[in-house]
Image: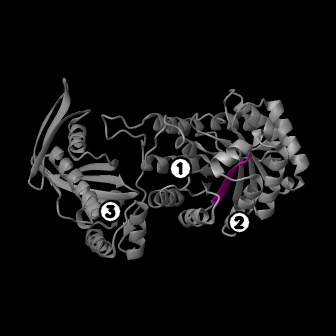
Amino acid sequence: MREVRISDVTMKQSGNTKEVSLTFKEKLEMAKLLDRLGVAVIEAEGIEQSKIDSLRIKSIASSVKNSSLAVPVKLDPESVSVTWKALKDARHPRLQVPAAISPAQMEYIHHLKAHNMLTAIEDTVSACAALTEDVEFIADDATRSDPEFLYEAIRTAIQAGAKTITVCDAAGTMLPEEFSLFLEHIYANVPALQDVTLGVSCSDELSMADACAVAAVIRGAGEVKAAAYPVNIVSLAKAVKVLNAKSDLCQAYCKTGTTEMKRITDQIRWMCETGRSKSNPFDNGVQDVADGVALTAHDDLAAVMKEVAKMGYDLSEEDSSKVYDAFLRIVSKKGSIGTRELDTIIASTAMQVPATFVVESYVINSGNLLTATAHLKIRKGEQTLESVALGDGPIDAAFLAIEQITGQHYELDDFQIQTVTEGRNAMGEAVVKLLHEGKVYSGRGISTDIIGSSIRAYMNALNKIVYEEQE
């Protein structure tokens, strides 16, 4: 009995729909959840903005331990090189070469005629195969292509080194019997397909994607693209359920787990449906992120900086030395340091800059019978700026007021509050992490007023972003 691999496209597809908006942190958490579930392949979005997207792929690559991580490239050598540089440290890296095969899409998307398209496929797949053995060729819109050209494109990709060939019913207009017959014709006309894995991707336009995928598996498909969250494609939960219940009929099985399926898909659904509202900078769907890092005095500078890089920071050599010196001082007293403590060290020692924005005053109104409001006055040079904002709580309102004053919204990557002294006059410490252009900036604030320390931490991080932009 053969194994059928499940390739989850939730993360990739979310970038193509306005209904789902995932933050950097949510994508990392989703990758960890899918990896724990045991899907064979996790598909990520390709690189559009080199610095931001490269950091995203590198961060996901370091989080995924068992699944393959697949990232698409464009039909040009530079795209292959840039993508591989970000993906190469993944435990199981896969490069994908998607190409529109139908005549209309071929010219509209790639601006290429059929002959040139075959050359581009050959060159790009060959470039990918020179870097990794796991190369997937994706024939987009295959069901509306010219059959003979589709067969030739598949032959070209296999000869160039593709180990997985995926055909897509992007229109989603085929019934299961039609799709099965479509695959039968491909097998008959491309004998070399028997030596590689055939994958399928079915749109759910007619609510038949799951049935078409099962028909494809029965016909011989070895990989199915599915999604943990409904994005108009095969349902991950349903595909796994059918393959487990009807393995004898399909003569196939999949290793994707079922025990945690509902819990993990529910968590992913919650992330996808909890987008940021205009009135709440905190909204995101990350529910539980464990701090599994434990650095000790035995860890050298390189080991500490490796964890710092995983957290999204890009420190200069000078700041790296400052952080490591502070780390050694603290770890000698505590024995070990986790991610949250490392965040605090970075916020307090690295990237210290002159303050462009300075808080002059703030007034917070909050209670169980009224909506929280924040009135902030902030000085920028000789100019005093002020704003009043409503929020879900006092800190939420304060952060929104800062956004209104500065005219900028930065993704709030993390927010931590903890006490640093005891008693009625205890000092509260806040650490705020803002994400801007793929880089994390952290700020730290200390005060007997926890709202005040939160505002100072946010302003500290904001000033770092503004200073670097001015430089």
Q: Is residue 278 left or right of residue 230?
A: left
Residue for badge 1: 31
Q: Which residue is drawn at the image coordinates 37% and 63% (left, top)?
A: 313
In the rendered structure, which segment of residues is drawn in magenta? 94-101
Observer-nearest of 152 and 40: 152
Residue that carries the numbered disc 2 in the rendered image: 129
Residue 325 falls within the magenta-colored stretch:
no
Q: CA distance from mark 2 to mark 1?
A: 25 Å
Identify which residue is drawn at 21% across, 65% down: 353
243 lies above or below 381: above
Identify the residue at the far top of this view: 369
State the residue position of label 3: 342
Q: Position of residue 422 (x, y in %)?
A: 15, 51
Which kind of residue does numbered mark 1 sit on? Ala
* Residue 416 makes an appearance in the image: yes
User: Of the residues shown, which amino acid type is indicated by label 3?
Assistant: Leu
Asked whether residue 141 is in view, the answer is no
Separation of residues labelled 1 and 3 (CA atoms): 23 Å
Residue 271: x percent and y percent?
A: 46, 38
Residue at 82% across, 32% down: 178
